[in-house]
Protein backbone atom coordinates (compact mmCIF):
# COMPACT_ATOMS: atom_id res chain seq x y z
CA UNK A 1 0.00 0.00 0.00
CA UNK A 2 1.91 2.99 -1.34
CA UNK A 3 0.75 5.61 1.18
CA UNK A 4 0.72 3.36 4.20
CA UNK A 5 2.29 4.49 7.45
CA UNK A 6 3.53 2.30 10.30
CA UNK A 7 2.52 -0.80 8.38
CA UNK A 8 -0.88 0.41 7.18
CA UNK A 9 -2.88 -1.84 9.52
CA UNK A 10 -5.52 0.79 10.29
CA UNK A 11 -6.10 1.44 6.59
CA UNK A 12 -6.30 -2.31 5.95
CA UNK A 13 -8.89 -2.85 8.70
CA UNK A 14 -11.03 0.07 7.54
CA UNK A 15 -10.75 -0.77 3.83
CA UNK A 16 -11.86 -4.31 4.56
CA UNK A 17 -14.76 -3.05 6.68
CA UNK A 18 -15.93 -0.71 3.91
CA UNK A 19 -15.70 -3.38 1.23
CA UNK A 20 -17.52 -5.95 3.37
CA UNK A 21 -20.29 -3.52 4.40
CA UNK A 22 -19.39 -3.62 8.09
CA UNK A 23 -19.22 0.18 7.99
CA UNK A 24 -20.50 2.71 5.47
CA UNK A 25 -18.26 5.67 6.35
CA UNK A 26 -15.02 6.66 8.08
CA UNK A 27 -14.75 9.94 9.96
CA UNK A 28 -11.17 11.12 10.33
CA UNK A 29 -8.72 13.90 9.49
CA UNK A 30 -6.92 14.42 6.21
CA UNK A 31 -4.68 17.17 4.91
CA UNK A 32 -4.80 19.34 1.81
CA UNK A 33 -1.84 18.20 -0.34
CA UNK A 34 -1.00 21.75 -1.37
CA UNK A 35 -1.07 23.41 2.05
CA UNK A 36 -0.91 20.44 4.48
CA UNK A 37 -3.74 22.16 6.32
CA UNK A 38 -5.77 19.49 8.17
CA UNK A 39 -9.51 19.07 7.81
CA UNK A 40 -12.10 16.63 9.08
CA UNK A 41 -13.60 14.41 6.41
CA UNK A 42 -16.16 11.69 5.76
CA UNK A 43 -14.75 8.86 3.62
CA UNK A 44 -17.08 6.33 2.00
CA UNK A 45 -14.90 4.71 -0.68
CA UNK A 46 -11.88 2.44 -0.29
CA UNK A 47 -9.95 4.35 -2.96
CA UNK A 48 -10.37 7.61 -1.07
CA UNK A 49 -9.37 5.92 2.17
CA UNK A 50 -6.10 4.68 0.67
CA UNK A 51 -5.39 8.05 -0.93
CA UNK A 52 -5.74 9.87 2.38
CA UNK A 53 -3.76 7.32 4.43
CA UNK A 54 -0.91 8.55 6.60
CA UNK A 55 -0.35 10.28 9.92
CA UNK A 56 -1.33 13.88 10.68
CA UNK A 57 0.67 15.87 13.17
CA UNK A 58 -1.27 19.15 13.04
CA UNK A 59 -4.45 17.71 14.55
CA UNK A 60 -6.27 20.90 15.48
CA UNK A 61 -9.55 20.50 13.59
CA UNK A 62 -12.92 19.59 15.20
CA UNK A 63 -12.89 16.00 13.93
CA UNK A 64 -16.36 15.17 15.14
CA UNK A 65 -17.84 17.99 13.05
CA UNK A 66 -17.60 15.53 10.17
CA UNK A 67 -19.65 13.06 12.21
CA UNK A 68 -22.58 15.47 12.07
CA UNK A 69 -22.26 15.63 8.29
CA UNK A 70 -22.07 11.84 8.07
CA UNK A 71 -25.17 11.22 10.20
CA UNK A 72 -27.40 14.20 9.48
CA UNK A 73 -26.58 15.07 5.87
CA UNK A 74 -25.36 11.80 4.39
CA UNK A 75 -27.56 9.51 6.53
CA UNK A 76 -24.71 7.11 7.30
CA UNK A 77 -25.58 4.48 9.91
CA UNK A 78 -22.39 2.43 10.40
CA UNK A 79 -19.48 4.75 11.03
CA UNK A 80 -15.87 4.22 12.07
CA UNK A 81 -14.09 7.09 13.78
CA UNK A 82 -10.31 7.43 13.68
CA UNK A 83 -8.66 9.93 15.99
CA UNK A 84 -6.14 10.81 18.64
CA UNK A 85 -6.99 10.04 22.30
CA UNK A 86 -8.96 13.23 22.99
CA UNK A 87 -11.13 12.58 19.93
CA UNK A 88 -11.59 8.95 20.95
CA UNK A 89 -12.76 9.89 24.45
CA UNK A 90 -15.31 12.33 23.04
CA UNK A 91 -16.60 9.73 20.58
CA UNK A 92 -16.96 7.13 23.34
CA UNK A 93 -18.89 9.58 25.50
CA UNK A 94 -21.25 10.23 22.59
CA UNK A 95 -21.67 6.50 21.97
CA UNK A 96 -22.62 5.77 25.57
CA UNK A 97 -24.69 8.90 26.24
CA UNK A 98 -28.45 8.70 26.70
CA UNK A 99 -28.88 12.38 25.83
CA UNK A 100 -31.56 12.82 23.16
CA UNK A 101 -29.37 15.02 20.97
CA UNK A 102 -26.39 12.66 21.10
CA UNK A 103 -28.21 9.35 20.81
CA UNK A 104 -28.45 9.36 16.95
CA UNK A 105 -24.71 9.90 16.69
CA UNK A 106 -23.91 7.29 19.30
CA UNK A 107 -26.05 4.67 17.54
CA UNK A 108 -24.22 5.32 14.27
CA UNK A 109 -20.74 4.72 15.70
CA UNK A 110 -19.69 1.11 15.05
CA UNK A 111 -15.93 1.32 15.56
CA UNK A 112 -13.55 3.73 17.32
CA UNK A 113 -9.88 3.56 16.33
CA UNK A 114 -7.42 5.47 18.51
CA UNK A 115 -3.99 6.61 17.38
CA UNK A 116 -1.04 6.69 19.76
CA UNK A 117 -0.26 10.32 20.51
CA UNK A 118 2.41 12.11 22.51
CA UNK A 119 1.31 15.54 21.29
CA UNK A 120 0.06 17.37 18.21
CA UNK A 121 1.28 20.59 16.68
CA UNK A 122 -0.16 23.95 15.75
CA UNK A 123 -0.45 24.11 11.98
CA UNK A 124 0.92 27.62 11.54
CA UNK A 125 3.84 27.10 13.91
CA UNK A 126 4.84 23.71 12.50
CA UNK A 127 4.27 24.12 8.77
CA UNK A 128 4.81 27.83 8.18
CA UNK A 129 7.35 28.69 10.87
CA UNK A 130 9.45 25.53 11.14
CA UNK A 131 9.18 23.74 7.82
CA UNK A 132 8.67 26.60 5.37
CA UNK A 133 10.75 29.37 6.95
CA UNK A 134 13.52 27.39 8.61
CA UNK A 135 13.88 24.45 6.21
CA UNK A 136 12.72 26.21 3.02
CA UNK A 137 10.35 23.34 2.20
CA UNK A 138 7.01 24.38 0.72
CA UNK A 139 3.89 22.52 1.95
CA UNK A 140 3.22 21.04 -1.49
CA UNK A 141 6.72 19.53 -1.47
CA UNK A 142 5.95 17.43 1.62
CA UNK A 143 5.24 13.81 0.70
CA UNK A 144 5.16 12.36 4.20
CA UNK A 145 5.59 13.30 7.84
CA UNK A 146 6.52 10.75 10.47
CA UNK A 147 7.77 10.70 14.06
CA UNK A 148 10.52 8.18 14.81
CA UNK A 149 13.40 8.05 17.21
CA UNK A 150 12.60 11.35 18.86
CA UNK A 151 12.54 13.22 15.55
CA UNK A 152 10.02 14.56 13.08
CA UNK A 153 10.95 13.03 9.73
CA UNK A 154 10.02 15.05 6.65
CA UNK A 155 10.11 13.24 3.32
CA UNK A 156 9.73 15.46 0.26
CA UNK A 157 8.31 14.66 -3.16
CA UNK A 158 11.86 14.40 -4.60
CA UNK A 159 12.62 11.72 -1.94
CA UNK A 160 14.89 13.94 0.15
CA UNK A 161 14.63 13.47 3.92
CA UNK A 162 14.99 16.18 6.57
CA UNK A 163 14.77 15.78 10.33
CA UNK A 164 13.81 18.01 13.25
CA UNK A 165 14.43 16.85 16.85
CA UNK A 166 11.16 16.82 18.77
CA UNK A 167 12.79 18.94 21.47
CA UNK A 168 13.10 21.72 18.90
CA UNK A 169 9.33 21.62 18.34
CA UNK A 170 8.24 22.29 21.93
CA UNK A 171 7.01 25.76 21.01
CA UNK A 172 4.83 24.25 18.25
CA UNK A 173 2.85 21.91 20.54
CA UNK A 174 -0.80 22.86 20.88
CA UNK A 175 -1.62 24.25 24.31
CA UNK A 176 -4.43 21.76 24.83
CA UNK A 177 -1.96 18.89 24.56
CA UNK A 178 -0.45 19.95 27.88
CA UNK A 179 -3.76 19.22 29.61
CA UNK A 180 -5.04 16.13 27.79
CA UNK A 181 -4.80 13.80 30.77
CA UNK A 182 -1.70 11.86 29.78
CA UNK A 183 -3.47 9.30 27.57
CA UNK A 184 -0.87 8.03 25.11
CA UNK A 185 -2.64 4.98 23.68
CA UNK A 186 -6.30 6.04 23.44
CA UNK A 187 -7.65 3.81 26.20
CA UNK A 188 -11.29 4.46 25.23
CA UNK A 189 -10.86 3.05 21.72
CA UNK A 190 -11.99 -0.31 20.36
CA UNK A 191 -8.60 -0.61 18.66
CA UNK A 192 -5.53 1.47 19.47
CA UNK A 193 -2.77 1.73 16.86
CA UNK A 194 0.65 3.23 16.34
CA UNK A 195 4.26 2.58 15.46
CA UNK A 196 5.54 2.48 19.04
CA UNK A 197 6.81 -0.93 20.08
CA UNK A 198 6.93 -2.40 16.56
CA UNK A 199 9.67 -2.80 13.96
CA UNK A 200 9.76 -0.37 11.02
CA UNK A 201 6.83 -0.67 8.63
CA UNK A 202 4.70 -2.58 11.13
CA UNK A 203 1.83 -1.48 13.35
CA UNK A 204 1.25 -2.11 17.02
CA UNK A 205 -2.44 -2.89 17.63
CA UNK A 206 -4.04 -2.99 21.07
CA UNK A 207 -7.47 -4.60 20.76
CA UNK A 208 -9.60 -3.44 23.67
CA UNK A 209 -13.22 -4.47 23.03
CA UNK A 210 -15.25 -7.25 21.40
CA UNK A 211 -16.02 -4.86 18.54
CA UNK A 212 -12.30 -4.38 18.00
CA UNK A 213 -11.74 -8.14 17.99
CA UNK A 214 -14.44 -8.60 15.38
CA UNK A 215 -13.07 -6.02 12.95
CA UNK A 216 -9.48 -7.24 13.28
CA UNK A 217 -10.42 -10.91 12.96
CA UNK A 218 -12.51 -10.23 9.87
CA UNK A 219 -9.67 -8.29 8.20
CA UNK A 220 -7.35 -11.21 8.96
CA UNK A 221 -9.82 -13.75 7.57
CA UNK A 222 -10.07 -11.88 4.25
CA UNK A 223 -6.31 -11.51 3.99
CA UNK A 224 -6.29 -7.73 4.33
CA UNK A 225 -4.41 -7.95 7.62
CA UNK A 226 -1.53 -10.25 8.55
CA UNK A 227 -1.36 -10.26 12.35
CA UNK A 228 1.60 -11.38 14.43
CA UNK A 229 0.55 -11.84 18.03
CA UNK A 230 2.88 -10.52 20.72
CA UNK A 231 5.36 -9.23 18.12
CA UNK A 232 5.56 -5.78 19.71
CA UNK A 233 7.55 -4.51 22.67
CA UNK A 234 5.22 -3.36 25.44
CA UNK A 235 8.09 -2.01 27.51
CA UNK A 236 8.64 0.92 25.16
CA UNK A 237 4.95 1.77 25.08
CA UNK A 238 4.65 1.63 28.86
CA UNK A 239 7.73 3.81 29.28
CA UNK A 240 6.44 6.48 26.91
CA UNK A 241 2.98 6.31 28.45
CA UNK A 242 4.39 6.92 31.92
CA UNK A 243 6.57 9.72 30.60
CA UNK A 244 3.57 11.45 29.03
CA UNK A 245 1.50 11.05 32.19
CA UNK A 246 4.26 12.62 34.29
CA UNK A 247 4.71 15.44 31.82
CA UNK A 248 1.02 16.28 31.92
CA UNK A 249 0.64 16.02 35.69
Image (spheres, rainbow, N blue to C red):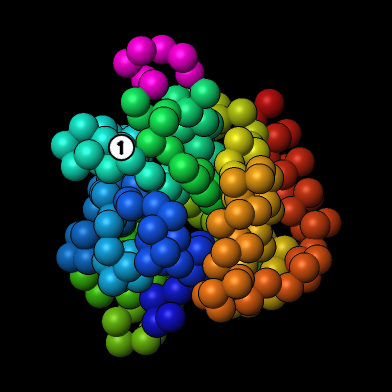
**Vertical side of 62 occupied by 197: above or below:** below
Answer left or right for 217 relative to 105. Answer: right
Disc 1, SS: helix
Q: Is residue 8 above or below residue 158?
A: above
Task: Answer above or below: position of 69 versus 194.
Answer: above
Please tell me which residue is depicted at 56% across the width and 57% down the height of the picture.
215
How many marks overall?
1
Question: Does residue 206 appear anywhere in the picture?
Answer: yes
Helix, strand or loop: magenta stretch? loop
Residue 117 visible in the shown view:
no
Say left or right for 176 vs 143: right
Q: Position of residue 132 (x, y in %)?
A: 27, 63
Residue 86 location (% of width, % of height): 50, 34
Examine the rendered structure and indicate whether residue 46 appears above or below residue 95.
below
- Side (left or right) of 109 relative to 92: left
Residue 154 rendering spot, x and y as whole percentages: 41, 71
Seen at 48% across and 51% down, the residue is: 169
Residue identified by numbered label 1: 67
Q: Which residue appears farthest toward the front when viewing the image?
A: 21
Boundaries of the magenta span: 97-103
Give residue 146's position: percent from left, percent from top: 48, 66
Residue in the foreground of this view, choosing between 86 and 133: 86
Which quarter of the picture shows residue 142? bottom left
Residue 46 among those drawn in magenta: no
Q: Quadrant of the C terminus?
A: top right
Amino acid sequence: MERRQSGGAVTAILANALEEGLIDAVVTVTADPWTQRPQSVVITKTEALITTAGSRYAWWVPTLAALKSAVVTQKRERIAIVGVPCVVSAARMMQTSDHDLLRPFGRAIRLIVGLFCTETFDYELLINDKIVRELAIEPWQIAKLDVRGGKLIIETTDHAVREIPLDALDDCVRRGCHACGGDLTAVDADISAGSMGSPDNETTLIIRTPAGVGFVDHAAETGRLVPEEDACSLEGILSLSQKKSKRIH
